[in-house]
Image (tube, rainbow, N blue to C red):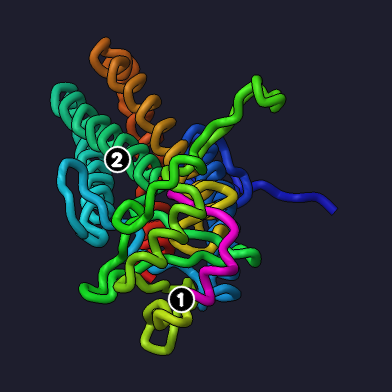
């Protein structure tokens, strides 16, 4: 049995040619990469969603975690994250304009739109680095129990979170560092919290208006606030002080939240950072007239596909971590 390939004015449906689906080889490879990367991000987000559903009663509330704005003191829930999202979306708009200008062979417009895209991406990466640093440093501090649960502190008079510095009592004997003269040999003492557990407990007992709030979310969607007696009893289970968040401890609640936050936003941030570097290379090639000599700006279009992809992924990351 032989296969007949139609010749003449009609082309074979399965012939393909150099540009199957009317796309160049470079565009097809970019689409293959985007699809595979989309599956990777989907797996991460599905894992995040499963973990959040499983531990929903102890999952941190985003409005209480992401409340910072650079150079401003106060509680501004989601404001800066919304700003970051707006900047990244606008950079996608300038990339569209750059691709359109490239189709029209308008070199100067492509240069300016690509420059604006690079600036937007750099602002986003810098903002994400700042957000990481703030998340790691923490705001108020908390204590962790034997079972790994987080106990936060609240001022009963105002209803607001209370920082450890607001009530902890200084006990100098607890802050003495190990010395070789004492026979304790070590290479590095490691990170030490601002206050010891004994200092926090002593300050809590001496400040009657401070209560404990557990990480368990009640029916009203708020974390459970204990009475003074319940707080004193609960504090007996505390084993250590926690400040900020890392892969092991998280003052805001479940440590899984911090694990997923660092991994997923870090993975996305790496994509944006890589995109900025690629855009810079393309930007200088445009200035040097490389694509003018080629007679097309297809490379701008290919990097534009990648840039739109990382923007779209951030919309899902933003929704999962900050809005839902």
Circle 1 residue: 231
Circle 1 or circle 2, nearest the eye: 1
How far separated are the C-alphas under marks 1 and 2? Answer: 37 Å
| Residue 235 falls inside the magenta stretch | yes
Q: Secondary structure at mark 1?
A: helix
Task: Tell me if residue 219 comes above or below residue 210 in the rendering.
Answer: below
Q: Is residue 10 visible?
A: no
Give how far across and how far down residue 275 sits, in percent: 39, 33
Nearer-the-camera pick, 78 or 207? 207
Give how far across and how far down residue 223 sits, in percent: 41, 77
Q: Earlier in the sequence, mark 1 or mark 2?
A: 2
**Label disc, if present, on residue 115 of the rendered structure:** none
**Residue appearing at x 48%, y 64% in the figure:** 253
Circle 2 residue: 127
Image quadrant where one finds the C terminus: bottom left
Residue at the outermost right position: 1
Give how far across and how far down residue 311 sits, in percent: 35, 48
Nearer-the-camera pick, 262 or 237? 237
Q: Residues within 10 Å of mark 1 (few under 14, many from 20)?
A: many
* Region rendered in magenta: 231-243
Task: Tell me if residue 122 comes above or below residue 68 in the rendering.
Answer: above
Q: Is residue 110 visible?
A: yes
**Residue appearing at x 36%, y 65% in the figure:** 206
**Residue appearing at x 46%, y 57% in the figure:** 251
Q: Is residue 311 left or right of residue 252?
A: left
């Amino acid at each position: 049995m032989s296969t007949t390939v139609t010749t003449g004015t009609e082309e074979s449906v399965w012939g393909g040619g150099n540009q199957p689906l009317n796309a160049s080889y470079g565009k097809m490879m970019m689409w293959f990469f985007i699809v595979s990367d989309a599956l990777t991000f989907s797996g991460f987000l599905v894992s995040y969603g499963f973990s959040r559903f499983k531990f929903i009663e102890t999952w941190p509330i985003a409005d209480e975690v992401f409340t910072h704005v650079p150079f401003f003191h106060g509680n501004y829930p989601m404001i800066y994250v919304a700003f970051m999202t707006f900047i990244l979306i606008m950079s996608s708009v300038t990339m569209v304009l750059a691709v359109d200008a490239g189709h029209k062979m308008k070199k100067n417009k492509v240069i300016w739109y690509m420059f604006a895209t690079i600036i937007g991406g750099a602002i986003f990466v810098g903002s994400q680095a700042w957000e990481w640093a703030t998340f790691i440093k923490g705001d108020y501090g908390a204590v962790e129990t034997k079972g790994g649960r987080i106990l936060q502190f609240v001022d009963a008079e105002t209803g607001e979170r209370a920082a450890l510095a607001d009530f902890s009592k200084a006990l100098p004997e607890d802050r003495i560092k190990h010395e070789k003269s004492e026979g304790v040999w070590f290479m590095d003492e490691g990170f030490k919290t601002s206050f010891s557990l004994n200092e926090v407990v002593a300050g809590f007992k001496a400040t009657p208006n401070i209560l404990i709030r557990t990480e368990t979310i009640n029916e009203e969607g708020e974390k459970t606030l204990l009475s003074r007696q319940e707080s004193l009893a609960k504090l007996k289970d505390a084993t250590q002080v926690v400040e900020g968040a890392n892969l092991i401890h998280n003052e805001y609640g479940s440590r899984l939240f911090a694990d997923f936050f660092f991994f997923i936003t870090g993975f996305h941030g790496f994509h944006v950072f890589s995109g900025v570097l690629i855009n810079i290379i393309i930007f200088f090639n445009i200035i040097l007239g490389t694509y003018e000599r080629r007679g097309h700006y297809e490379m701008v279009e290919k990097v534009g596909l990648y840039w739109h992809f990382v923007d779209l992924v951030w919309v899902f990351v933003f929704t999962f971590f900050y809005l839902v």
